[in-house]
Image (cartoon, rainbow, N blue to C red):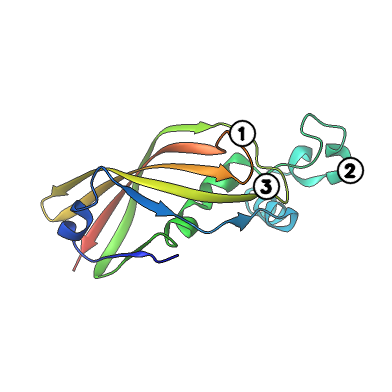
């Protein structure tokens, strides 16, 4: 999959209102879930106890919703190569909805659309409408609107 290569406001602007692409599939392993639990001190059994989770509402362990969200930057970098940067800042997340749990071992990918772009006195504000798909599932794991500020050189 070829990434878009963008190095200026004008290069981003040509994609406004268009789909930007999708990432590769990424398996959400139990090891990744456990590492996230350790990093956040969220060791709820539905995430980290496979034996107990077998009898739980999902039949197995599931990823933390915030783990799914935290994978967004990694997956985003597979879609767009933003270069010629001084700095990039995460500016906001809006209309976030967790639609379906991600079970341990399932694969997810990011699908993106450039919903809006603005030039704020030389700072490029980009609004990306996104959803994170679960392979083989109709419902999305997560959807929303993320806003980045790009400070191009």
* CB under 8 Å between discs 3 and 1: no
Residue 40 marker? none
Residue 51 marker? 2
**Where does residue 31 sit, x and y in percent of width and height?**
73, 58
**Where does residue 138 sit, x and y in percent of width and height?**
59, 34
Which of the two residues, 8 or 88, is positioned nearer the viewer here? 8
**Rounded to the nearest whole Å, what is the CA distance between mark 2 and mark 3?**
20 Å
**Rounded to the nearest whole Å, what is the CA distance between mark 3 and mark 1?**
23 Å
Q: Please tell me whether mark 3 sits on a helix, a strand or a loop.
A: loop
How crowded is the residue under tag 3: few (<14 C-alpha within 10 Å), some, or many (20+)? Answer: few
* Residue lying at 89% horizontally and 43% vertically, measured from the top left: 51
Q: Please tell me whether mark 2 sits on a helix, a strand or a loop.
A: helix
Disc 3 vs disc 1: which is toward the camera?
Answer: 1
**Rounded to the nearest whole Å, what is the CA distance between mark 2 and mark 1?**
21 Å
Above or below, comparing residue 36 to residue 3 in the picture: above
Query: Which numbered disc flags the more N-terminal residue, 2 or 1?
Result: 2
The residue beneath circle 1 is: 100
How crowded is the residue under tag 1: few (<14 C-alpha within 10 Å), some, or many (20+)? Answer: some
**Rendered image quadrant of residue 11:** bottom left
The residue beneath circle 3 is: 41
Q: Please tell me whether mark 1 sits on a helix, a strand or a loop.
A: loop
Direction from residue 39 to residue 50 in the image, left or right: right
Direction from residue 72 to residue 26 in the image, left or right: right
């Amino acid at each position: 999959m070829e990434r878009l290569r963008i190095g200026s406001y004008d290069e981003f602007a040509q994609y406004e209102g268009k789909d930007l692409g999708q990432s590769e599939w990424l398996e959400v392993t139990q090891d990744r879930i456990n590492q996230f639990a350790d990093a956040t001190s969220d060791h709820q059994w539905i995430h980290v106890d496979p034996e107990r989770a077998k009898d739980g509402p999902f039949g197995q362990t599931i990823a933390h919703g915030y783990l799914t969200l935290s994978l967004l930057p990694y997956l985003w970098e597979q879609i767009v190569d933003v270069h010629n940067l001084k700095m990039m800042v995460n500016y906001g997340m809006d209309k976030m909805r967790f639609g379906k749990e991600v079970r341990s071992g399932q694969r997810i990918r990011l699908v993106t659309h450039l919903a809006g772009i603005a030039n704020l006195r030389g700072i490029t504000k980009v609004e990306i409408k996104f959803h994170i798909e679960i392979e083989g599932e109709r419902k999305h794991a997560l959807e929303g609107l993320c806003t980045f500020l790009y400070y191009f050189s």
